[in-house]
Image (cartoon, grey):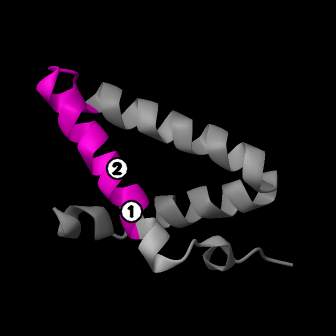
């Protein structure tokens, strides 16, 4: 039985607020001359840690598989 990670999404207003906070944090770290790789790695690690407290491991695997599929399809490159 596959897990639908979209069923776990927060309401749009909450998601927009969280995104704005993350954007500000990234902006701050860039201003502190922290490398993009370090910023992205720390954000990913923090996101995975947060997910591990909130959802089952299989849901995290599904989310990561969706991310891998997006990378392989070139979707992230099209966003830049």
Q: Look at the image and give the residue range highlighted in magenta.
A: 16-36
Q: Name the residue under label 1.
A: 17
Nearest the eye: 33 or 21: 21
Nearest the eye: 58 or 25: 25
Magenta segment: does it hold 23? Answer: yes
Query: Which residue does the image show at 57% across and 71% down from the upper left?
Result: 10
Q: Residues within 10 Å of mark 2 (few under 14, many from 20)?
A: few
Q: How crowded is mark 1: few (under 14 residues within 10 Å), some or many (20 or more)?
A: few
For label 1, the SS is helix
Please tell me whether the stretch drawn in magenta is mainly helix, strand or loop.
Answer: helix
Magenta segment: does it hold 1? Answer: no
**x, y percentage for residue 69?**
48, 66
Drawn side of residue 4 relative to residue 39, left or right: right
Query: Which residue does the image show at 36% across and 70% down from the upper left?
Result: 73
**x, y percentage for residue 72?**
39, 63
The Cα atoms of the two marked residues, 1 and 2, are separated by 6 Å
Where on the picture, by quarter, is residue 64?
bottom right
CB contact under 8 Å: marks 1 and 2: yes
Q: Name the residue under label 2.
A: 21
């Amino acid at each position: 039985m596959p897990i639908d990670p979209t069923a776990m999404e927060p309401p749009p207003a909450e998601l927009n607020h969280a995104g704005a906070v993350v954007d500000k944090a990234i902006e701050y770290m860039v201003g502190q001359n922290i490398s993009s790789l370090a910023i992205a790695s720390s954000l990913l690690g923090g996101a995975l840690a947060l997910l591990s407290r909130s959802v089952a491991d299989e849901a995290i695997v599904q989310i990561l598989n969706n991310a891998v599929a997006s990378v392989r399809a070139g979707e992230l490159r099209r966003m830049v």
